[in-house]
Each structure stands twice: as C-alpha cells, then as structure tokens.
Image (cartoon, rainbow, N blue to C red):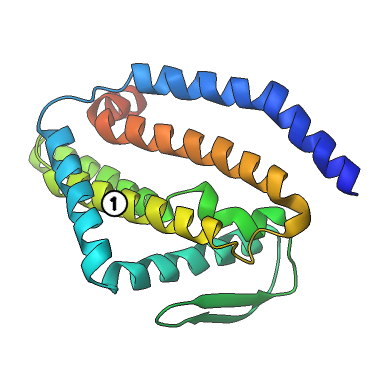
Amino acid sequence: MENIKILVATVMFLFITPIIVGIGVILVRNTDFRGEKLVYMGLGSVLALLLINFTSVLRRIYIFFHEVAHMIAAVCFSARIFEFRVRESSGYIKSDKNNIFIRLAPYLLPIICYILLFIYYNVMIYMRYYHDHREGYSIFFFLIGLFYVVTTVYNVKLIVQETSDIEKNEVMLSFLIILNIYFLTSTALFYLLFNGEVVLDKIYFL
C-alpha cells in the first residue's frame, strides 16, 4: 500500500502538476489584476493579517467552514453524517466513510471565498436584470481578500502542526494533492472574481 501511494505521488508530480501549473498560469495571465478591485482585495488581506494576531473571531469562522468542507466532501462520497461539532478552538465530524479526499477537503478549496463568489455572481445577475447596474461590488473583493488570507494562513498552521487530517503514511501524497488543487482553485477563484463581468457576458450574452 505504501509503495502504491509513492507511485501515485510520483506520477502526480511528474505528469499532473505541470498540467495544473500550466492551467493556473493561463488563468492568471487572463486575469485583470488592476484598478480598485485589487485595492479592496489588498485591504481585506491586510486586515486579515492584523486580526489574526489580535482576535480569535476569524479562527472560529475558519473552524466552522473547515468542518463544513469535511462534511460536504463526506456527503459527496455518499457518507452519512452522525455528528457535526465546532468548538472555540477545534471541531470535528463523525461519518461512516473516510478517505484522503474527505480528510483533505478543507485544504483543497477556500470554501468561504467560493460561497462569497457565488453570492457575488447572483448579486451581479440580479442588478443587471432588474436595475441595469454593472459596477461596484467592492465589498465582495474586500471580503474575499480577507477570508482568502484567513483560510490560507490557518491551513498552513494546521499542516505545520501535523493535523490529524494528514496521516503519517500519506504525507507526500497529501502535500502534492493540497498544493496542486489549492493552487488550481485559487487561480480559478481570482479569474472568476476579477473577470466577473466578462464571464457573465460570455455565459448569458448580456
């Protein structure tokens, strides 16, 4: 079993990682990181770095969505959830299934940011259809900048602390999966966020 995991990790590093990096580079090159959007996202990121050091509120929010990510992944694998609990400094779920993707789910996708992105797109669609409004929405860039930093910082802290989500016999494979998928979901997030108007034009021909 250990040899299989090493083989999978090697194949991923040699063949899958270059493809994912290539896709990420294409997304970044086609993302317009200019104007006040980047400023608001930067302000949110700076505020996150400050708040992380002075309050535990963001940690509690992170823990909640960390466990939500575990739960969503478990449900995707047809698991039954027996318990979902979030405490001040930790949390856990109990289900009848467990695999590497369920364990790593919170580290693969900045889930809070994608929830905000979903709300952002729905607000844009609503404002276009009913008010012919196509500008603004700075608050979403601020919030996504804030929670992206929060998610990334706490993910790194948990990994460094040898979280139970990463089993000792699959460390290398887990790290490769996390780095590849988090890089891909992050670049996709920035592309969809900064090019929101363009994406809607292509999808809805508005």
- How far across and how far down the image is residue 24, in percent? 47, 25
Residue at 78 percent across and 54 percent down: it is: 169
Q: Decide: is 116 above or below 54.
A: above
Q: To which quarter of the image does residue 32 belong? A: top left
Residue 123 makes an appearance in the image: no
In this rendering, does residue 111 appear at all?
yes
Front residue (pair 10, 120) = 10
Q: Residue 26, relative to residue 9: is it above or below?
A: above
- Residue 85 in percent (x, y) is at 51, 82
Report the side of 92 relative to 189 (left or right).
right
Towards the viewer: 197 or 101: 101
Where 154 sits versus 203, above or below? below
The amino acid marked with disc number 1 is Ile
Name the spot of residue 1 as percent of width and height, x first.
91, 49
Seen from the viewer's position, the closer of residues 72 and 185 is 185
How many numbered tags mark residues here? 1
Q: Which residue is mark 1?
A: 119
* Residue under the point 61% across and 58% down: 73
In the displayed structure, does residue 174 sit left or right of residue 3? left
Q: Residue at x 25, y 52 (%)?
A: 146
What quarter of the picture does the C terminus occupy?
top left
Q: Is residue 82 left or right of residue 51?
A: right
Say above or below: 31 vs 86: above
Frontmost residue, 179 versus 201: 179
Residue 48 is drawn in which quadrant? bottom left
Mark 1 neighbour density, 10 Å: few (under 14) some (14–19) many (20 or more): few
- Judging from the image, what secondary structure is the residue with disc 1 in? helix
